[in-house]
Amino acid sequence: MKAVKYLSIILVTFVIIAGIAIPMVPEPQSLFEFPIIPGLEDKARNIFFHVPVAWTSVLGFLVALYYGFKYLRTKNLDYDIQSVSSAGLGMMFCLLATVTGSIWAKFNWGSFWNWDPRETSIFILLLIYGAYFALRSALGSDEARARLSAVYAILAGLTAPFFIFIMPRIVGGLHPGAKGDTSGSTPVAQLHMPPNMRFVFFVSLIGFSLLFIWLLNVRIRAARVEHQLSIKDH
Amino acid sequence: MNFIVSTWAIVVKDVRSELRTRYALNALLMFVVTSVATILFALRDDELSPEILSGMFWVVIFFTAMSGLSRIFVSEEERGTTLTLQLVASPSVVYFGKLLFNSGLTLILSSAVTVLYVVVFPAFVIKSPLIFGFTVFLGSLGFASAATIIAAVIAKANTKGTLYPVLSFPILIPLLMTVMKSTARALDGELFTAALGEFQILVSYLLVMTAGSYLLFDYVWKE
């Protein structure tokens, strides 16, 4: 875990420095120059932060779902601790993705919120996280809390394909890959980036994923200690 | 064969206990009347476009359903009959019995809202009855399938009433967006083939939700 910790710190620091400091010029000559994208200019730098954060919020949900599933199979409360730790982190990244996207949308698309399919999806992901924690706080025993919140996470996960694959096709949108996009409407938007931007982008994806793994590990250990203490109190 | 007989027995039992008090049916119908009356007061004499009316149509159904459909499991919990039911019937039998009852209730509810809307809103003219019929039928069944499993989940929680719409809404959004769109098509008088895409989504939603609930119900039902 130490290696993950230091690697994530190094990678995210690199992305912050490279993503902000590398200048944007009309005709890039060297590796350390990004091209100016007409209509986006410096606003294009958001892709190094917004997309990885949004990806991590989905990752947090998937990990919570996976451990919820494992809990249902084994009834081992430790899996529930892992599941809820991941959901909490995912919710934090989901808020970050919403805020970074919303501020960017204000400057690029003219308003903070446009109900584009992907904005709708992230809003629903926030609602699911909110409902998940509301359900947990309303259940008395550890066992019922673990069992029912795992069931709810799986049910919510079942609706995900409708948002990822179906909705962007039937509702027009502003994100790349939406219906009417000239480069084709696919679930995963195609990347039109010069190699050096693409490199920073993928480093950012890996860096934020590693950051998630490290934070998750810290949270799980803290939650286990808390759980042990609460058992001792009773 | 045995499965169908037992499932039907659960439905009959629920219908009988419902007819004894008429709690859910009366409450739901009064809720429909109240909310439509509130919309009418807010509108006064304004004419609404078909898009807005088709949205309002499902808003009324959503909130009405959220006020009543949870009773199916909450009432078992309140009367303390959950354990008996766990003893006499297998979980899948209980689930499909409750699902059938809730589907029937939702169909009655959406028909009532349809009649009321046609009567009180002059702009609510169903120009393609076939699209409208399919939308309301598939929409109600999909609605009931998601609402039933969430009802089973919240029956064990402390704050049942407020939690129910909070948990159901994110899961129902794909359904709500689709039915609103195809209801607007029905009011615009589009051809049946234009709404086929929406029907595919509704059918797949219904199948995914029912299959998922069937697999997960064991974990919800058994302590």
Image (cartoon, rainbow, N blue to C red):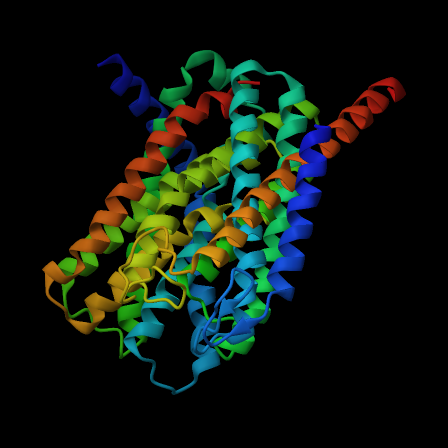
The N terminus of chain B sits in image quarter: top left
Relative placement, left or right, of A3 versus B130 is right
Image point (31%, 73%), residue name: B51
Residue sitting at x 51%, y 48%: A202
Instruction: Return the residue found at the far bottom.
Output: B45
Q: Residue furthest right?
A: A233
How many numbered marks does the figure carry?
0
Residue B158 in sight here:
no
Location of residue B1 with respect to B194 vertically, above or below: above
Residue A43 spot, x, y in % from top left? 54, 72
Q: Nearer the viewer, residue A106 or B26?
A: A106
**Depth check, front residue: B123 or B8:** B123
Image location of residue B46, percent across then percent down:
38, 86
Residue B39: % across, % down: 45, 74
- Residue A156 appears anywhere in the view: yes
State whether residue B48 is above or below residue A18: below
Residue A232 in the figure: left or right of residue B22 = right
A210 horizontally vs B8: left or right: right
Q: Work out whether residue B171 or residue B35 is closer to the camera in this orientation and state it.
A: B171
Q: Where does the image place residue B98, in percent across and percent down from the top left?
A: 39, 31
Q: Nearer the viewer, residue A175 or B146?
A: A175
**Location of residue A21 by image quarter:** bottom right
Quadrant of the rendered image containing residue A112: bottom right
In the figure, A175 relative to A121: above or below? below
Q: Quadrant of the C terminus of chain B?
A: top right
Residue found at x 81% / y 20%: A228
